[in-house]
Image (cartoon, rainbow, N blue to C red):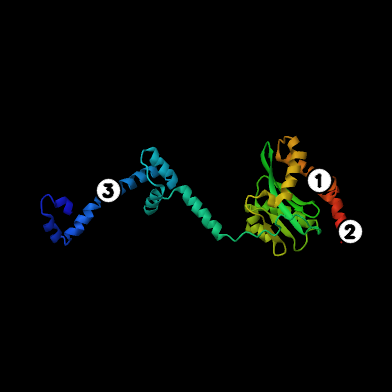
Amino acid sequence: MITRLREHFPVAYLCQRLEVSRSAYYEWMSGSAARQARTELVLQIDDAFTSTGCMDGYRKVTATLARRGIVRDRKTIARYMRVHGMVGFIAQRQFQRAKQRQARPADPPDLVGREFTSDEPGEILVSDITYIPTGQGWLYMATVIDVATRMVLGYACARTQTAKLVIQALSRARATGIVAPDAIFHSDHGIQYRSRAFARACGHRIRRSMGAHYQCWDNAVAESFFSKLKSEHLDRVTFLNRQDAAAAVDEYVARYNNERLHESLDYHTPAEHLEQLQHVA
């Protein structure tokens, strides 16, 4: 108001009537240029932010401004966006996912440590999921393999990779009677293995174990089986539908367990090695 009326009245008079000290007024005036610059920058940020449908975070907004010839420090852009509530949709989703990760129970520890050896059938189980292309779309396969014998104790195939798929594979493994009461069940950090449904299926008697994130060597036995399944059998055929692919899986698992010789088992089949271990016991 003083700035607006100073052309008609003395500044001292206006400051006296409005109960403002002249020194405070002149100090405020010295910073007005900086305030105007900040206001203009906020408007430019807002325009760049809204031009992308309010999707982008501060990094892309900074890049958008730079393309318009407005070069500013990325941290400055981030601060102004935060103060003025400009949060990109993608950033919101990432924040929500981070909160969900913090809220969920901690993943099980690694109880195997890449030591894929055992002399007791059913003591250590490894599991993973792979996919098989068909003319109808992907066919997903979950396996449960016994480390001691390398035998596929249970497996299941379905058109979707849900917790139900791995639960079915575990159920079939248990039905063999080979799984030990306090067996270790080792897998990756897939959402299927982290689900509450799968945790309930394991109960208190099966000890869940997970390797490190994105480390295929932490589940090498399961990865090795899938490699053999595809290179020795599935890669030779083009499947028109999921039913044919599932039948091919059945055929290979039967041969793998009962006919295929394994170098790691001193050139015995998993079925033969299981019989030997049970005989020793």
- Quarter in which the C terminus is drawn: bottom right
Residue occupied by mark 2: 279
Label 2, secondary structure: give it.
helix
Q: Amino acid at mark 1?
A: Tyr
| Quarter residue 280 falls in | bottom right
Marks 1 & 2, CB-CB < 8 Å contact: no
Which residue is painted at 39% across and 40% down in the image?
A: 66
Asked whether 26 or 212 is in front, the reply is: 26
Mark 2 vs mark 3, CA separation in Å = 87 Å
What count of labels does the image hold? 3
Which residue is painted at 23% across and 55% down in the image?
A: 28
* Foreground disc of the pair 2, 3: 3
Residue occupied by mark 1: 256
Q: Earlier in the sequence, mark 1 or mark 2?
A: 1
Residue 111 in view: yes
Residue occupied by mark 3: 36
Q: Amino acid at mark 3?
A: Gln
Marks 1 & 3, CB-CB < 8 Å contact: no
Label 3, secondary structure: give it.
helix
Q: In the current view of this chain or complex, which residue is farthest to the right? A: 279
Label 1, secondary structure: give it.
helix
Q: Earlier in the sequence, mark 1 or mark 3?
A: 3
